[in-house]
Image (cartoon, rainbow, N blue to C red):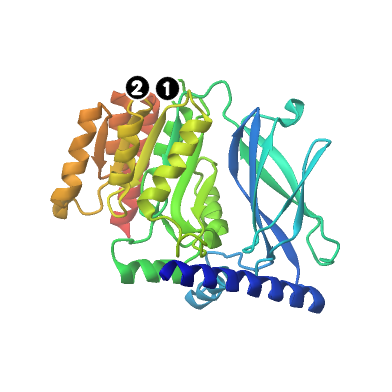
Amino acid sequence: MHKTVRRCVYRLERRYDKLKHRFKRWRGYAPVIVEPYMTYGTRDELWVSGRLLEAKGVQGTIEDSNWKNFVHMMRRYRSAEIPFTEIQLTLGADKRNVYTDGNGYFHYRWPTPPKKDVEQPWTKVTLQPADTGLPKAQKYTVAEISIPDDNTEFGVVSDVDDTIMHTGATSFLKHTKTVLFNNAHSRTLLPGTSEFYSALHKGTTGNANNPFFYVSSSPWNIYDLIAEFIRINNLPKGPILLKDFGLREDRWFKSGHQDYKTDRIKTILKTYPNLKLVLVGDSGQQDVYAYLKIAKAYPDRILAVYIRDLKPNDRSEKITSAANEYAHYQVPFAFIQSAGDAVEHAKGLCLVTDQAVKSVKMDAAADKSENTID
């Protein structure tokens, strides 16, 4: 019975989307933008993704009030997507077309792109609405696609909440306050993260240009906020892979946090069959269990797993037991309290340079000094 109800609700939602789209086209859309998402690919295959939306006007500054941040966050979650509309993708002289789905998203697999136009470490594809019924549409935007280069030693998969960005995800009230009343400038980078990630990015040679993948179960609605946070905190640029919370015909919601992350990481491993990975997460949102599934399936492809321990004095037996299982698959695992802990462990595995260890420790010492003064 519930399957029939879910199918009916899904189809009603699709019909509503189509009617809303027709009405807005008749009335006239507000300024429209193709929001590009950073993705990844190879010289033989590109993935291009984005979303067609009415412009949200949510750029923030450090001076913004809590109220302004709240208004901007509501705009993100109440985004006016534009469904069933044609988008043109351009790479060099090659052009392809794709249609947005009912929620305004588009995902295009571009097989055999023109090799002369595929650049490493980043290939740029121009996106523009192909529908003349959108007179206020921004002329074009540019999507960046990560193409690991020949110097790559390994890749890094990182969680976002409480791994690079303090959100208090283990406390509902703290997490809600952080999410609703802060922007990319006012959110806090966890100490030492920038230097540690830079060390992994540079690798054992100091110039490896190792690719980063930011995998989070946060919704696509806050993509712009996460991308801006990464940029202003000088973290390595990389694809940001988020989650669509929309209704599906075959189930009420998308897959859970754990399944979502393992599926994303498996796809990365399959895309780059010779690439090994370092996985970084936290103890608050099942990263230990998600990464353990990957370690079991690909033990020879995982160089290390680092879990930021949010509650070291209150760690459950279940999470400790899961952590101990990594040894069975000979995958190095470490709970970390600081970037200093992580970089020392990484140096022991020959993943970073001696100079990187010094830089991370100096950065951590500076953070500690500033906090003491405050």
Q: Residue at x 47, y 26 (%)?
A: 275
Q: Is residue 162 above or below residue 348?
A: below
Q: Where in the figure is residue 247, as x and y percent of width and height?
A: 51, 65
203 is higher (above) or lower (below) than 21: above
Observer-nearest of 14 and 80: 14
| 190 over 249 or under it: above or below | above
The structure residue drawn at horizontal position 32% and vertical position 72%, both measured from the top left corner, is: 173
10 Å crowding of disc 1: few (<14), some (14-19), many (20+): many
Residue at (84% x, 66% y) in the render: 133
Q: Which mark is residue 204?
A: 1
Q: Is residue 268 above or below residue 16?
A: above
- Residue 162 position, x and y percent, is 35, 54
Residue lying at 28% horizontally and 24% vertically, measured from the top left: 348
25 relative to 201 in the view: left or right: right
Picture quarter with the N terminus: bottom left
Amino acid under label 1?
Thr
Residue 181 shows in the view: no
Task: Label 2, secondary structure: give it.
Answer: loop
Callout 1: helix, strand or loop? loop
Around disc 2, counting alpha carbons within 10 Å, would you say few (fewer than 14), some (14 to 19), or many (20 or more)? few
Mark 2, residue position = 350
Q: Specify the quadrant of the image occupied by residue 115.
A: top right
Tell me the CA gap for discs 2 and 1: 6 Å
Question: Which callout, 2 or 1, points at the residue further toward the start of the chain?
Answer: 1
Q: Nearer the viewer, residue 331 or 167?
A: 331
Disc 2 + disc 1, Cβ < 8 Å: yes
The total number of labels drawn is 2
Q: Amino acid at mark 2?
A: Cys
